[in-house]
Each structure stands twice: as C-alpha cells, then as structure tokens.
Image: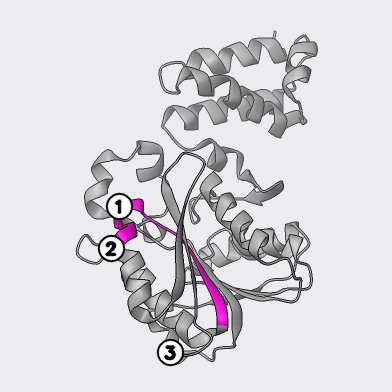
Amino acid sequence: MNTVASLSRYIKEQLSETVESEELQQFVLLIFDHLRGYNRVDLMMKGKEILSEDEVYIINEAVARLLKHEPLQYVLGQTEFMGSIIMVNGKVLIPRPETEELVSWILDEHLNDNISVLDIGTGSGCIPIAIKQRRPRALVEAWDISGEALEVAIGNAELNGVEVDFHHRDVLNFRKYELATKDIVVSNPPYVTAKEKKVMKANVLDFEPHQALFVEDDEPLVFYKAIAELAMVVLRPGGYLYFEINEAYGDELHAMLEGFGFKSVVRRKDLSGRWRMVRAIRPVHP
C-alpha cells in the first residue's frame, strides 16, 4: 500500500547508493514538504496516510531524476532563500547559503530603506528580492546576460510580491548602457575556473548553467574587473561594492580593488570558515 511511511522507505532505499546517508532524511522531508507541506513531526505521525496516484507518480519521477544526480531543487522546481520560496530550473544557479550570508552582510551595514542597489548577474533574482523584501523603499535594479534567467527572476519577484527593475544586459560591455547612480553594487559572478571542473560533483557540473559558473583559467577575475570598473562609474562617493568570491583568488581580487582606488577592502569568511565575501568602498575624495 502506498502510505507515507512506505514511500519514505522507498525513497531512502532507491537513493541509498546515490545520496549520502545524512542527506537522505532531508531529501525525504523536502519531498513531502513539497507534496503535502509536511514537517518532520508530520512524517512520523502521519505515516499510515495513503498517497494519491498523482503523488506516487511525482515521487517516482523525483527518484528517477535524483538517481541521475539532478539536484533536488531542480526536481522540485524551487528552493528556499532567506525564508522565501525561489523557483529554479536549469537556466539559473541554485542559491547557496553563502549567498544568504552576503545579503545579510549588506543588510547589516545598510539599515536605511532609502538606498539604491544594483545586482549584476542576478540569476534567479534571489539577491535583489531578499534585499527588497527587507528594505521595501529601496530602489533595486538587477542585470543578467541570460534572457531565460531573467524570465525566472521576474517570476520570482512576482511570486514574492516585490518590485525589482530587471534588465537584459552584459556587464562586460556596460559602457553602452545608460547608467544611474547607486549606493550599492553587489554581484555573485561566474568565478569557477575551467581547471576546477575535475573536482566538482556531477549534480553541479551536469545540471547547473555553465555560463553562470565558469571562467577561463587565464582570466579568473574577468567579471570582477568589469564590475569593479562599473562600480567606480555608478557608485556615489562612499558607495559600497560587495562580491561573493572564489577564495583561491582572494588576494588577487583584494589587490585589484585597491588598484582601482577602492578603500576599506574587507574579506569575510562564511559559516564554513572559507573566505567567500569581499566588501569595498568607493572613496569620498579621489
């Protein structure tokens, strides 16, 4: 009989050789949360409840895709970011916890609602949406070179009831656009070098968009350089630039930002103890 308990066991049995044991229970919980809004207690208390044929079909489809190492977030079509539901598919990166930490850093340093923010390479739109939700009077703009990613981001802004000004733009050619002054520029740009592919897991390498992940080995800071140049143009004096970074190039990036004239360049560790974030300030006086 297709009960909650029996299908929970089925998921675990099928995925036991594909998914690490500590993740299995979390996968079961996320699948049933998606299907029925169940939490951990519900799974224990409602184990005898019968699932519908549609629910069984969804679980079978999810297991088949997970066996091919597809990320669970893509299978479910959504993830959570700072308490909000963010829809995701293979056209956008799955938001990571370290990106939540980057947004929290921004919010901690900017308590005033009356700020203007530009997010470069917005992907799912998680960064500008989270900022706008917490700073409702902020003017928030976001760019991406991918029209398909922007469709996802626009949908997520609508889903979460916030207004973000999205633009289909290429930061490597930013000088051709009309630019408005900002208080904050933020970006989680592509920063994984091609040589790092060999150590990446299949669920990332085979399913997440390479355009949003990878840079050439000989130009690891190509996007950081362009965004820093843009920030020097659009940031008001005393404005802030925030990056999520590849810790392997932290020293290089730090030196580059100081070379552009930024002041108060600070790196910060994520909760895993890795140097994954940078903040810099455009000087008030040249």
| Disc number placed over residue 175 in the picture, else none | 3
Q: Nearer the viewer, residue 98 or 94?
A: 98
Q: Position of residue 123 (x, y in %)?
A: 53, 61
Mark 2 lies on a secondary structure that is: loop
Quadrant in the picture for residue 199: top left
Quadrant in the picture for residue 150: bottom right
Quadrant in the picture for residue 39: top right
Amino acid type at circle 2 is Pro
Q: Which corner quadrant holds the C terminus?
A: bottom left
**Closer to viewer: mark 1 or mark 3:** 1
Which residue is found at the position 57% from the left and 13% from the top? 10
Q: Nearer the viewer, residue 183 or 144?
A: 183
Q: Is residue 265 left or right of residue 164?
A: left
Q: Is residue 6 left or right of residue 122?
A: right
Number of numbered callouts drawn = 3
Q: Position of residue 31 (x, y in %)?
A: 64, 29
Q: Position of residue 211 (x, y in %)?
A: 38, 61
Amino acid type at circle 3 is Arg
**Closer to viewer: mark 1 or mark 2:** 1
Query: Magenta region: which residues?
Result: 238-251
Marks 3 and 2, the one that precedes in the sequence: 3
Mark 3 lies on a secondary structure that is: helix
Which residue is found at the position 36% from the left and 74% from the top? 258
| Disc number placed over residue 220 in the picture, else none | 2
Which residue is found at the position 54% from the left and 92% from the top? 178
Q: Which residue is mark 1?
A: 248
